[in-house]
Image (spheres, rainbow, N blue to C red):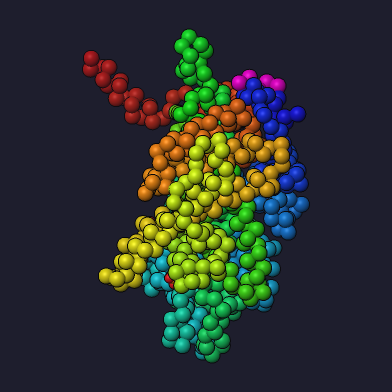
Amino acid sequence: MNPYIQTNDNPDITKERKNASFDVEKFSEFYVGGKRVLAVRREVEKYVEDRKELRDPIPSAFMSREELIDNSMRKMVEMVSHEDMFDITNIEKLSYYASLVHVREVHALSLHYLMFVPVIQSQGTSEQIEKWMTLGLARAISGTYAQTELGHGTNLSKLETTATYDSKTQEFILNTPKISAAKWWPGSLGKFSNHAVVVAILYTNGECKGPHPFVVQIRDTETHKVLPNIKLGDIGPKMGINASDNGYMIFNNLRIPRENMLMKHSKVLPDGKYIKPPHSKLAYGGMVFVRSMMVRDIANHLAIAATIATRYSSVRRQGEITPGKPEVQILDYQTQQLRIFPSIARAIAFRFAGQELRNIFKKVSKQLTQGNAELLPEIHALSSGLKAVVTFEVQQGIEQCRLSCGGHGYSMASAFPELLGFSCASCTYEGDNIVLLLQVAKFLIKSVEKIRSGQGSDLAEICEYLNRKEARNSTLNDFKTYTNYDIVSDIEFVARRQVFRAFNKFEEAKKTMSKEHAWNSSAIEFCKASRWHVKLYIVRNFFKKVDQDAPQEIRPVLKNLARLYAFDLIASAAGNFMENGYMHFEQIQQIKNGFYECLSILRPDAVSVVDGFAINEIELRSVLGRRDGNVYPALLEWAQNSSLNKKEVLAPFEKHIGPMMKKARSML
Ligand SMILES: CC/C=C\C/C=C\C/C=C\C/C=C\C/C=C\CCCC(=O)SCCNC(=O)CCNC(=O)[C@H](O)C(C)(C)COP(=O)(O)OP(=O)(O)OC[C@H]1O[C@@H](n2cnc3c(N)ncnc32)[C@H](O)[C@@H]1OP(=O)(O)O
Ligand SMILES: Cc1cc2nc3c(=O)[nH]c(=O)nc-3n(C[C@H](O)[C@H](O)[C@H](O)COP(=O)(O)OP(=O)(O)OC[C@H]3O[C@@H](n4cnc5c(N)ncnc54)[C@H](O)[C@@H]3O)c2cc1C
């Protein structure tokens, strides 16, 4: 029994659902992470559906910025008051609940829960955790994470906000020495947070010790007025995420107690003596945490976009394939499938990679709490790489899905503008993608150095392919007999060659210039190497998940999607595979044929696969993607929310165009 089939739905979409070759419910269970997870999601959905107060009174597209903020804050306070749902001991349930209430908004406590509280928890001493976490978890205070400045975001060592220790008073003096040092961008800083973890350059006993985190109260907890020696404000409207008051902050020699420096890893003793952390980058742990959370979350945005585009394309009829026959569903066009189906496959590939990353992150966090930072570089490289590759491809995929919906895709009713606004931001926040790819490259360099110095057996598992023996040619003969193992081996070959190419270029360049200039002159090759390394990880993980974990009933549909993903990857980088004859022209043709076959195998199942993503209507928030496929009446109804439709003749007409035309008529 397919729960998506209901009476009064658009007949085309119903027909699609009836033709599915697999059990949608089984697919959903596997996709979301198990039967129990799906049941919890349904329980949360019902809960939110039944409570009007947790929902938007009108579509958010029709709200002004003030209304957006008011509505978001109202929902946030309502959301947290339902303690059975907002249960911080059950992060899966809580984050799904929050995503249904807030959809694609960053609300006033997003940064509080995502960065302020976790950073205190991971970087604070037990006394600091006791003090700030108790207040934070009770929501007696609300905090944000203020690191980026007007002049510096990426290059943390050159941040300019200073925290100078005064041993006489046992205080830090926070200061913004010049305009470029103003904090700029932190979410919820502009108007709502009353505390912040501020990252500032520490000076003690006259020595600079680099960036460190400090807990700073920035507004009065009773009056909410900005505290003396601080200037705060909103930075203005952005491409998206406008319910959030991203803000600026300027300090004028603000004094805070010594106890406000988060001192789990590095410490400043009362006399100003500095104690180094066990690993110099432990203070960056908050960013690693968010990057590890982002991957699965942003993959879901691509799943949403693909759902909208697929459902809409199944009910939209335009043009003919056979002359004289009725207009076809646009999903039948092969070019439409090219625009949408790779996004369906990627959404799944990225979700599985995000799930795996979260599992690894949990393992590393446990080790870190026991003082073991051995796996920190590995998780930093993996989370940086996945964040960079996934956010970029999600953003590109959403745009392809938008284009596939023609004019209606451009309307806010489609949800694409807000999906795009969010995904564009995710390419930048938590580290610009290029910068993060270069971080991955540093990790790859170390692996190659190990191989070259005869320590190839000592590589992280994720880099073991770098030490495999070179094959001279791809063994691909016919795509039908091209096994998952062969596909991975061929992608490994290209990834390995690119990593060594970048490394060799770097080594060569170092002979004639400084290491830093050599690095810059090899950076494009290194970014390519990092991308291949990450994409290889994603493909391998996708196949592993399908071959080892997927239930038998849904394995064929998932296997087709995994192959579609891999064939697309190879076909769109054919040059890399053909270089030096590793693959020849006919083999690339085989890959393309395989890709075309994957598209046509997916076609009759496409609607059911996106149904299988189990995305609730509230989270979808799209007229084009609605489950019942009744798009046209819904678009007309949606447009009635426009304030322009409230009056028949608008004042600007009476004021400007009306008189102009009247005058023109009188002169004829
Ligand atoms: C409860 C919630 C539930 C669900 C939510 C789910 C999902 C969330 C989804 C959405 C989010 C929604 C809302 C949030 C919205 C916005 C939030 C945005 C917040 C921010 O943007 S905060 C600011 C982020 N800023 C950055 O990321 C800056 C990027 N820069 C850097 O990371 C670093 O500066 C650097 C890595 C580029 C360089 O650092 P450096 O100057 O110190 O460099 P060095 O050359 O000295 O050292 C490099 C050396 O160090 C290693 N290294 C670097 N970082 C790390 C690390 N983190 N861990 C370990 N090692 C690290 C690096 O590899 C080099 O090593 P080497 O040995 O020297 O080669
Ligand atoms: C919506 C949104 C929310 C945000 N929220 C927060 C927040 O809550 N708290 C917070 O502290 N910050 C926040 N930020 C800031 C964000 O983290 C930074 O914008 C981001 O880290 C990039 O830094 P930047 O803006 O200084 O870019 P820059 O570092 O100036 O980068 C600009 C360009 O220069 C290139 N570049 C820079 N350095 C290098 C290099 N070493 N090698 C090669 N190329 C380089 C980059 O690739 C990029 O193309 C937010 C940003 C956005 C958009």
Residue at (49% x, 49% y) in the render: 491
Residue 340 drawn above or below residue 378: above
Q: Can residue 441 be seen here?
A: yes
Residue at (54% x, 49% y) in the render: 488
Q: Give 632 or 18, whichever is nearer the viewer.
A: 18
Residue 576 drawn above or below residue 436: above
Residue 478 drawn above or below residue 451: above
Q: Give 280 or 195, whichever is nearer the viewer.
A: 280
Q: Can residue 302 be seen here?
A: no
Does the magenta stretch mainly form a helix, a strand or a loop?
A: loop
Residue at (71% x, 36% y) in the render: 553
Q: Residue furthest top?
A: 324
Location of the C terminus by quadrant is top left
Residue segment shown in magenta: 7-12
Q: Residue 180 in the image: x percent, y percent?
A: 37, 66
Q: Residue furthest left?
A: 667
Q: Residue 399 in the image: x percent, y percent?
A: 46, 39
Asked if residue 494 lies left or right of residue 372, the reply is left
Q: Residue 317 in the image: x percent, y percent?
A: 52, 20
